[in-house]
Image: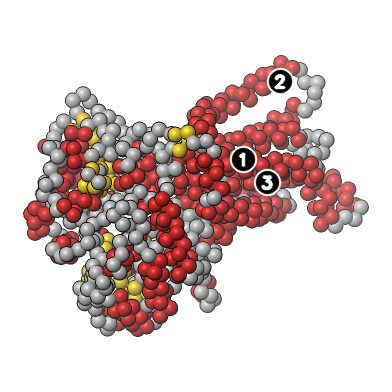
Amino acid sequence: MSQSTPSRRNLLKAVGVSALGLGLTACGRGFGGGGDSSESGTVQLNMVWWGDATRAQKTQAALDIFLQENPGITTKTEYQDSGPYKDKLATRFAAGNAPDLVAMRTDSLREYADRGSLLDLNKHTDQLNLTALPPNIRNIGAVGEQLYGVPSGLNTIGFVVNKTITDKYGVPIPDGDTWAWKDLAAFAKEISAKSGKKVYGTGFEAGTLANMVVFTRQRGEDFFTDDGRLGVSEATVTAWFEMIEKMRAEGGFPPAGFFDNIGSSSSESPLAKGTLACQIIPTNNFLSYNKDAGGNLALLRIPGESTERRRGQTIDTPHLWSVSAKSKHPAETLKLLDFLVNDARASKATGTTRGVPVNPNVTKEIASTLALDDQVATDYLTKLQTEKLLRSSSNPPGASAIAASLKTIATEVEFKRQTPAAGAKAFVAAGQKALAR
Amino acid sequence: MTALLERTTRARPAAPARKPAPRKRRRDRAGYVFLLPWFVGMLFTIVPFFASLYLAFTDYNLLNAPRWIGFANFREMLADPLLRQSMKVTFLYTFISVPASLAVALLVAMVLNKGIRGLAVYRAVFYLPSLLGGSVAIVILWRHIFGANGIVNDLLGWFGIHGPGWTSDPDFSLSTLILLHVWTFGSPMVIFLAGLRQIPVMYYEASAIDGASKWQQFRSITLPLLSPIIFFNLIQSLISSFQTFTQGFVMSGGTGGPADSTLFYNLYLYQQGFSQFHMGYASAMAWMLLVIIAAFTAINFLAAKYWVFYEQ
């Protein structure tokens, strides 16, 4: 009988051993190690970015041209989904295994640049020619006198409206160059009402920083000031939340919990599912959204551009290209980067998957070869570029923590756990703390 | 769990003390050989283990060399509202899901122990979720099932109920994850089942003759004789539940949202270390978690004196 249940001693040991096992189990995953040179005489460059398979194909097409002309160089490319990209990149740098050419988020730039992990491109102008770039564009990757990244392309955010839906319910689309936020609210309300809420008029995430930044600028404030402090006021954040909650109460904006984080790709968007008539997208994704939403999208400006105190939209980039300070082959990496930036054949191959080319001469040269949808987004952006806009801004260190806290607080406001005013107060306090850190 | 099974199966021939010694030594040697892979794996964890202890006392941003700052990380933890939130989430999750999943596991084990036909099949079917439950694919599947426009809300819609966003509403998101955890009751169930099978039938027979009810039998025979197994499962579940990461990470896309409602301790630790470049702080958090888990385990061992019954 004594063996029928495990003895106390054995049980203690078993628990101890398995507890230790659980305690010590660490998860170790990451990009594979970056090999250096495959055979003598050839140089292997490691290049990482985020994106989908289509972007990978287009990027590879551009690389193929470069590789053919540079027989001494090979490339090892790695790409993945945008979400976990940033965490894995941090691990790569921490492990002393940084890639040579890196897709860098604008809100992470300072986190790497301030710690000496990136090459100052201003010191290598003989290998990387950036003279054709407008100063405003070059500034996106600048930190003081140093330059740590080149925009991979140019984009901005825009409102896309599904014309199939507006035609179906007979709602006219407002003029995208002159509409105000109240026009959006009226338009959205009408769509929702006429469709019996099968389709909501508009929807976008209150917690997406890029959206609120435009709204902030329109009200005459800078989201981040030039000396790296938080410029947005509580009143503006409150107004942003209140405007959205008002649209929600009127029915033009979907109920709380509508955006449920199932996926971020265009094919999973409410626009593609036909549950929203319009939403905000980055313009470089216009082609894929239009394809997934039935091919009948119109691209409008953000409301308020002509009715608020000043312009809010700026020219931005999906990401920067940075070179690791520890790259063993900086010369070859810079050569590749120069090819991507200045050679029209590279941009012909990639299309505008990362936005409009940063070099205006290249944009002119490839204009006629672009797919029609790429043409729409390119025209939108080039027209914007001829206008007087605010300077494209760079993000201070701590910007990514601010983006995270905006998301949290916006959700609390959405579910009425906080009033817009209380949420705004909490956000400004959290933002100031994140920047001070 | 494997350790326990190994112990119990090995313990049986070992118990009589008069077995010759050489055989025992040979058997022990075999045991160590079986443990060899674990020792080898240990080498890869022991270095990071102690490195993290050092890093806990430094300011380390992953890119530059760590800088010694003494207890500053631990002081900062005291004043960190997100850390408090992550503890709240983790404790809530643990204290609801662990008892709930153990209760379900015991219940199902007792039903299966009735000697129904096809036991092996049922056992496998119920065990399956615990192999899958922590996997990324299953969490993604759950995210779709419980999405605002997922299957669950479609079903509720047939009855005219407008379901909430089970994963996008901060009032429901953690409950959805708790449900997912309870669903993975298979591994404690299998252990319960093994334990139940070892309770001699004669106890039940004898008590039945004395007129004991089913409930009395459960209270006075099953529970006490099963208490070491319950204890084992409890400790195991507590430890793994404090370390929950995957479910929160995948369900929220790494943010711990909506509104930090699924910000598990380990998820916040990960964010601090790998997204915010505060690896020193993250290391300090890891050691704090170790202390918390050790404390809860110790409390359980102390309390065990009063309710765990060893039949010797």
The answer to whether any part of residue A282 appears in the image is: yes
| Residue B152 spot, x, y in % from top left | 51, 66
Of labels 3 and 1, the one closer to you: 1
Which residue is under mark 1? B291
Quadrant including the C terminus of chain B: top right
Q: Secondary structure at mark 2?
A: helix
Disc 3 packing (10 Å; few <14; some 14–19; many ≥20): some
Judge whether A421 appears above or below A71 on screen: below
Q: Give the mark toward the camera: 2 or 3.
A: 3
User: Is A90 positioned to the left or the right of B186 in the image?
Assistant: left
A369, A311: nearer the viewer: A311
- In the rendered structure, which disc, 2 or 1, sits on the residue that comes first in sequence? 2
Quick check: A325 left or right of A239?
left
Q: Which residue is mark 2?
A: B24
Q: CA distance from mark 2 to mark 3?
A: 32 Å
Colour scheme: secondary structure
Badge 2: residue crowd in 10 Å (few <14, some 14–19, many ≥20): few
Name the element at disc 3. Answer: helix
- What's under tag 3, amino acid-wise? Leu
Q: Identify the residue shown where x is 43% and y is 78%.
A: A249
To which residue does mark 3 refer? Answer: B234
- Which subunit holds the residue at mark 2? B
| 2 or 1: mark nearer the eye | 1
Residue at 52 percent of width and 51 percent of height: B80
